[in-house]
Each structure stands twice: as structure tokens, then as C-alpha cells.
Image (cartoon, helix red, strand yellow):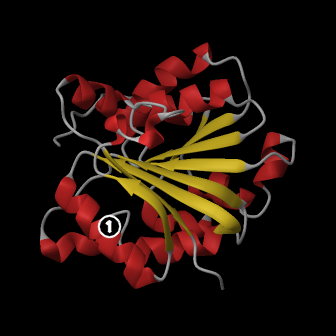
Amino acid sequence: MRLRNVKGSRETIAANEYAMHLPEEYESYKGCWNKFFGNNNPIHIEIGMGKGQFIMDLARMNPDINYIGIEKYSSVLVRALEKRPELETKNLIFIRMDAEDIVKVFDKNEIERIYLNFSDPWPKDRHAKRRLTSTQFLNKYNQLLQLDGKVIFKTDNRPLFDFSLEQVEEAGWTLENYTYDLHNSEYVEGNVMTEYETKFVAEGKPICRMVISREEN
């Protein structure tokens, strides 16, 4: 997907109270994100949050959970910041960063749940390790999640989903449930839609979803 540059997006993020963009800002909270939020509520993160509809809906619905949205691209994150003031809760913060650095930001057992929604499929084989469901990334998540922590992954890309199923087994994780057609399955109850998901469902595209839990270490 080609991203259109938004003039002044980096400056907007830098000046916004709902976002962090410098490593010295967000890395300083490693191991003490509950101190940032001022409570001991569970922490859920979304990696590749896009324009933020999904995570803002979750934050609105679940005030007793702290949410952190991670987005690499300033031009995308700035769109979420336009909507963030509408959310009258303090349980959501955004970080502009590359997912590669996630272990620098969160400590062992600090995260209860990770959401991956319609992630970049990186279709070329030589880029497989960049996929957010690769064993390389699963190993990173394994360092952050609580023992009962989960990763929930949704995509419309069947090849990426099949690859992800293989990676779960290779990494030694537990596949709790999965479906190739979420909206015609028993797992659709309680599902919160993303912007892409709303569009794809309207077009009649099936949505794949898996829930996996970490290996014990």
C-alpha cells in the first residue's frame, strides 16, 4: 500500500499530548507503564494501529484496560490523533515507532494482549522475517507477554494467514482457535471491527482470525 505523505505530520505528533515519538520518551517507561497510566490495570497493545478506529473503540468500551497503539508511519498516526480528543478517557496513548524495537519498550510479563490487524503481508519470500507473525516477531512477543497472554491476529490475506499458522507451530506457541471466515463463524461475537475490516466485509471478503498464546519459558 502506498502511503501519502502528510505535510507537518511529524511536527503534529511531536506537539500532541496523546502521542510519543522519541525513544527517550517511550523507552523510559519500560517496565513501568502502569506508572504512566497511574493504575495497575492490564495493558493491551496494537501493533500497526493505522488510523486508530479499532483501538479507540476498545479503549472506549473497556475503561479498566490500558491501551497503547503503535504505528510506524507519521502520515497514518496523525489521522488517529485527529480523532483522539473525542475519546473522553485516559486509558490510551499512541507511540510512533518501528515494531522491531518493541522489546526496548516493554518488559517481561508487562503485556496481557497484543492485537495485529491487517498487517503488511510483505509478500516477497526474502522479506518473510518482517511479517509481524513471523517466528522472529513471535519470539519478541514471548518476552513481553504474561504467562496467560494472547496474540489476536486478523487479516484478509490468506497466504499470510497460512504462513502465520506455520509460524505458530514452528515457534512452539499454542493455537487456541482460528477461522478462515470470522464473520460466518462462532468467534464473531464480541468482535470489534477495524477500518479495513469494515470495508472488506462490505465487499464480501472473508476475514481470517487466530488467537494464539505464548510458549512457557
Q: Crowding at label 1, few (<14), some or many (≥20) Cα neighbours within 10 Å?
A: some
Residue 109 drawn at (x, y percent)? 72, 68
For this rendering, which residue is in front, 10 or 62?
A: 62
- Residue drawn at 64 percent across, 30 percent down: 59
Q: Is residue 112 left or right of residue 178?
A: right
Q: Is residue 216 visible?
A: yes
- Residue drawn at 40 percent across, 32 percent down: 194
Dividing the picture into quarters, in which one does residue 65 lie?
A: top right
Seen from this angle, which residue lies furthest front?
186
- Residue drawn at 51 percent across, 33 percent down: 189
Q: Is residue 99 left or right of residue 15?
A: left
Residue 177 drawn at (x, y percent)? 46, 58
For this rendering, which residue is in front, 126 or 206?
A: 206
Secondary structure under the numbered disc 1 in the rendered image: helix
Seen from this angle, which residue lies furthest left?
124
Q: Is residue 106 visible?
A: no
Q: Is residue 165 left or right of residue 35?
A: left
Quadrant position of the C terminus in the picture: bottom right
Amino acid type, label 1? Ser
Q: Which residue is mark 1?
A: 164
Residue 52 drawn at (x, y percent)? 46, 31
- Residue drawn at 52 percent across, 58 percent down: 151
Quadrant position of the N terminus in the picture: top left
Q: Is residue 110 above or below residue 203?
A: below
Residue 153 drawn at (x, y percent)? 42, 53
For this rendering, which residue is in front, 138 or 168?
A: 168
